[in-house]
Each structure stands twice: as C-alpha cells, then as structure tokens.
Image (cartoon, helix red, strand yellow):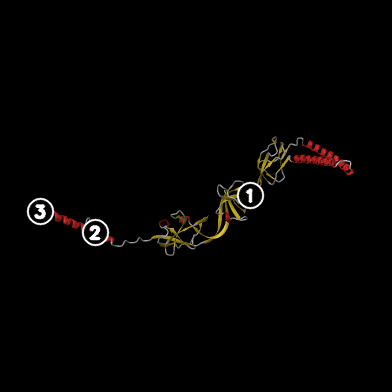
Amino acid sequence: MIRSLITSLVLAAAVVGWIMSGQFGETPEADAANSASEVATPVAEPILVRTKSYAAQDRIREIILRGRTEAKRWVDVKAETGGKIVAVLVSKGETVRQGQIIARIAMDDREARLAEAIARVNQRQIEYNAAEQLNERGFKAKTKFAESAADLDRAISAQVKIELEIANTEIFAPFDGRIEDRAAEIGDVVATGSIIARVIDQDPYLVVGHISERDVHRLRIGDSARAELITEEIIEGKVSFIAETANPATRTFRVEVLVRNPDRKLRDGLTAEIRIPVENQPAHLLSPSVLTLNDDGELGIRTVTDDNIVRFIPIEIIGDGNDGVWLSGLPDPARVIIVGQDFVRHGDPVRIDEDESPES
C-alpha cells in the first residue's frame, strides 16, 4: 500500500512539472509556427496604376437652362360696346397689321341716338348763348347762366359718348401679329368685355428658363445667350429680364432671353436648351470614366502626387463636349489616374505606369 502511495505521488509530481514547464499542448507543428512568427511579415507591394498628365485650358463657362419659347406679348381683344356681330374680317391663323379691322358690331339705333345728341347740343348751345347775353346785361341771374352752361356740357358729353360707342362697333388689331384664336362669329350677341379674338405678337419672341439661386448672381441684363430648340434650330439673343423673386416652390428665378423672329417661324411652347456664357476660367477636359466618388459620396478625381501618393480631389462639372466633360477644381497640370482608380484610396502609395500619349 505504501509502495502504491509513493508511486502515485511520483506520477503527480511528474505531471505538475510537465504542466509548469509550459509545454502542455505543444506539438512539433506549433513549434514550427512559433519559430516562423519570429520572422518579420513582408509588406504588400503598392498597387500599379496608370496615370496621365492633363493641362488646364481656358474655357468659357456656360450656364445651361432648360426652358421653352414664349410669345413676348399677346392680347385678348375684347368688345368695348355691346351688340350683334355683323362681320368677322379675319380667320384663325391669319396675320394682321396694327389698326386692321377684326370684326364689326351692328349699329342698331346708334345713328339715331347720335342725331338726337347733335340736335340737343345745338339746342343747348342756343340756350347758352341767350343766357350769356342776358347775364351780360344784368337781366338774368348768374345761377341761371351757370345752369345753361351745365346743360350744354351734358349735351356735349352725351354726343361724345355716342360717337365713341359708334367708333367701338369696329374692333381693331392692337399691334402687328397673328390671330391665334377667334371667339366671335357672325350673329353672336356680345356684351362689353366679351373676347373677340386673341392676337399674338410674333416678333420679337422670348425664350424663358429658370436659374438656380446658386447661379443667379452670375447673370446680367444684356448678356448674350444661345438657345437650341427641340427642332435643332439655333437662335441667339440677349438676356432681357431676371426675376427679383424666386418661385417659392422651386427656389429658381425666371430668366427671359429676347430673340428676333423676323421670318415668324418660332412658335410658343417649343422646348429649348439655353446656354449663357458667364465667365472665362481654366478647366480640364477629361473622359467621364475617370470620375469617381469618395467615401462621403463626393464626386471627384483620383490623382497622384510627385511622391506617388493618391490624392482625391473634389471637382465641379462645368460643361460637356464631344470628347468628354469639362471640370474645374483640379491642379494644373493634373496627374490623373486613368486605370486602377477604383482600387486605391486617398493616401495610398502607388506604383506608376505613365501614359505619355498626347491628350485627345
């Protein structure tokens, strides 16, 4: 029994010694791994990217607006007296000259009323002359003389009124233009204020757009502008109006460009792209394929410094062309990553494969 106890104690002491030696669980493979960890981990080689140097070019910055053509002025010609339409002398779509008769209203009893008014004026004139002579001789009170003068004035006013009413039976075009709509027909009975026709002035015309609050300060009255219509026609004019107050819904300002339309080809409501040059500035023409976003969602270009470190530069697109987009905000010259920009980040070191081909 004593021998068994001694054997157990010896075995327990051996086990404790083995554990305390730090070799518990160690294997030859673990020994190899520990030895390998003492060797320094190799550093990853920088990514190879292709770059190209771009020089800035002078470019006129243009503000581009989406808009439409609009008649500079139009008028709903209205009747200034009531009656039956007895003649309509123009057709819808017809060109008219200022002062041209559009329609006529029946005279009815107006000529008779005019004759009555003229006769009454003659009567009041005679009464006034007599009262004036008696007043000068002191045989008539001044109040009676004043009453005669007032009666004469009322008679003259009635005559002028009927003469004006007769003149208004003929309805004239207010300016040179085109009959866009004709509301009255022969036989219609119209009241004062009824619409007879709509006349549109065809020359000059407007091209209207809306500019953002960020760019409105760049425009000036008289700035040259060019508009391309949806028909691919190019028209040119001058900025004639810039709104002082913004549209409360869109926070944009109305801009009007006045253009000539001597051949009367423009129509109201044609879609147009308006380009207004505002300033000359250095810019880079690059392919849209080099544009990228940073982690914050900013649009920009990844460039490389002289120390071969990636640098992300936010940019602004100021125009487009047949060979790419015009950008502002880049250094001059700009060493742009044209291949591999999506595999590197701001601050990464890179290896360079420089593209020496001339700029397109």
- Kindly check if marks 3 and 1 are in contact, taking CB atoms under 8 A apart as contact: no
In this view, 313 is above or below 179: below
Q: Which residue is mark 3?
A: 2
**What residue do we see at 56% from left, 56% from top?**
62
Mark 2 is on which residue type?
Answer: Asp
Q: Nearer the viewer, residue 82 or 155?
A: 155
Q: Nearer the viewer, residue 130 or 213?
A: 130
Query: How many dots with numbers?
Result: 3
Mark 1 is on which residue type?
Answer: Tyr
Q: Residues within 10 Å of mark 2 (few under 14, many from 20)?
A: few
Tag 2 secondary structure: helix
Q: Comparing marks 2 and 1, which lies closer to the viewer? A: 2
Please give the label number shown on residue 31: 2
* Image location (x, y in percent) of residue 158: 78, 39
Q: CA distance from mark 3 to mark 1?
A: 124 Å
**What residue do we see at 20% from left, 56% from top?**
19
Disc on the earlier residue, 2 or 1: 2
